Amino acid sequence: MSLEKERYADVIVDVTQASMDRSYQYRIPPELENKIRIGCVVRIPFGNGKRSAEGYVLNIGTEPRIARDRIKPILEVPENRVTIESKLIELALWMKTTYGSSLNNALKTVLPVREKEKHAVREEVSLVWPEKKTRLLLEQYTRRHYAAKVRLLTALLKTNELEKSYVTGTLKITPESLRSLEREGVISVRSADLTRTPDDLQEPEEKEKPCILTAEQSRVCNGILREWEGANRPCLIRGVTGSGKTLVYMDLMEKVLKEGRQVILLIPEIALSWQNVKRFRSRFGNAVTILNSKMSKGERYDQFERLKKGEAQIVIGPRSALFTPFPKLGLIIIDEEQESSYRSENAPRYDARETALERARIENAHVVFGSATPSVDSVFRCREGRYAGFLLESRYGNADLPAVHVEDMREELRHGNRSILSEALREAVKERLERKEQTILFLNRRGYSGFISCRSCGEVIKCPHCDVSLTFHTNGKLVCHYCGYEISQVSRCPSCGSPYIGGFRAGTEKVEAELHRFFPEAGIIRMDADTTRKKDGYARILRSFASGEADILVGTQMIVKGHDFPRVTLVGVLAADLSLFVSDYRAAERTYQLLVQAVGRAGRGDLPGEAYIQTYHPDHYSIRAAAKQDYDAFYDEEMLAREMMHYPPACNLLAIHGSCADEQRLVVAMGHLKRYLIRNQSRDTVIIGPAPENIRKIQDIYRQVLYVKEPDEERIIRLRRLAEKFIEINSGFNRMMFQYDLNA
């Protein structure tokens, strides 16, 4: 190859050191010309000696950046690696810049399936001879007592084709017998690639009953289509629980599919896959597939390949499904958009909602958010005009919203009831059992290990500076995880003097045991992290409850999101306060969302629904608004609190998380970082901390967090970049890990 035609690849090496997080130029040898393209994985010489490493090709060109004789050749293209699409590389670069991670981590994130898997093979044994001729041969084998061949031919005469595993296993036919029949031309043995199919896709398709959009749903659908033809802003559908947002999604999907484009539907929990897949397959058939972490490697790879080839046009899954390599992506739908599970806890700590907006921008696609309880941030953007907002205010089929009762657990305690269930809720469960209707009991365990409160008056021990609860630590201290304020554990309520003060200790197993004590005749299913560990755990439990095998479903938050059980007429929320006073400025928002979502599981069929919310704080604005399902009342009070305390979306909030095996070194380093940021802050910047994380130590690694509040988004991103540079060039930060959260 002449020098003029020589081509070079910019490769980022797959190493963990931040200092190596840049591209290096390599020569493309002639024999690899047809194999190397942007996004593929290559093996390259790296460093001194004979060391080699793997890396990703970011760019290909003809201009050398250094002397040609110093540019080393690429060694090979590993056959078992999956290529990253060029548009996903662009997205990874944006994630690195926005969320402050290495480019390597960002590239690995946008590639949910990284290695090729061997194809699954199905071997089949088929009868070649015609029936009449085969029956004559069968008579010969019977006379000669060829028992194995008789078994095989008898079985093949019934079905004509059998799986080889069945032939060799159940029928016990030896390889020699098969070869003998094959040589004679009686049978053929052939192999075919088999697509590994997840359990959720193996259920028989049920044809959807025709659903005609209501006038309200048609208005929303048409409004979104007009928005797509105009400014194409992100669209937010806010619909009461049971309003039929899914039907609107389907109508929008159909229009995108007719244009020859594909759809990503993000859901917050794998537990929601079963019902979602069932509903969408009833409308779109095999065009629907899934991607999630419960699938085997082989299943994920096979579905990944189906999507790349265009054999499936709709993918349903949690946030990692956002990176499905569709050739013509047309629509991203994010259901239950308020859920915190859309934010990654690993670097890059990306928000799937923001990342979806960027991917849509790159691919000229549309984005639709949907929720009965949208995030304060999204509604704020609607009111600013950055999003287009649409309302669904009625339940589908004119069903009524459930009647909601708020049970004051302080009164229950005063009347001598120390059980998990209030008297009213217990009576309501009994009535449902008598009427052969179903009940969901939701134990709100978010914040389970956190705050300390008084069971007599409801008082919560809070930080005087940050308006969040103090968190109990095993050293006997109550600590604020925003500013570091701490006090010693209290034994009596500072408000009423009651000795009934402490944290909540009940779990789902205890609730289940209480239910068996009160209702020994009831069928009870528990759904939590313990009962869903197995691959099919979610679907097995939900199928069982949907088919009426149990009267009561008890579980954590995974049971209250998006499920639709027509015979559920009662929902009980146990310990609504647990999420209300965690050490998190979004605590009131998440409590409101959980309560409304939980209440919304009742009365979704022909039967009316009822819900009970058990709380020690019946007058809190989030609980009052949830009982009335009044989002606007909640939003107004919550935004007032955010503006007063300078929390998002009224202000930007950057969290800098540091971790180290040496706690004292970490404390000193975080102090230096804070002083450096103070020297570079603007007049409006506020820096809080550093303070211990909610969990101070994990696997002997200590953790601290520093918060930066800044109204201007560009300035806060600049401060994060300055922090990254300061950490990179100062040896005092060696052997420490840092991660960044923006507006989390």
Image: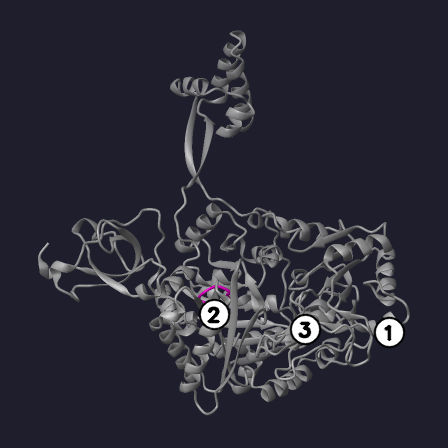
Instruction: Determine the CA span between mark 3 and mark 1.
Output: 21 Å
Residue 381, can we see it? yes
First in sequence: mark 2 vs mark 1: 1
Give the secondary structure at mark 3. Answer: helix
Mark 3 residue type: Thr
Q: Position of residue 284 (x, y in %)?
A: 54, 57
Q: What secondary structure characterizes most of the magenta part? A: loop
Above or below, 481 relative to 267: below
Residue to which mark 3 is pinned: 591
Residue at 46 percent across and 69 percent down: it is: 665
- State the image coordinates of residue 324 (x, y, percent, origin top left): 44, 60
Q: How many neighbours does mark 1 have within 10 angstroms: few (below 14), some (14-19), or many (20 or more)?
A: some
Q: Considering only order in the chain, which callout, 2 or 3, is on the residue closer to the N terminus?
A: 3
Q: Which residue is mark 1?
A: 411
Circle 2 packing at 10 Å, graded few (<14), some (14-19), many (20+), is: many
Stretch of the chain drawn in magenta? 344-352
The residue at the point 70 percent across, 69 percent down is: 578
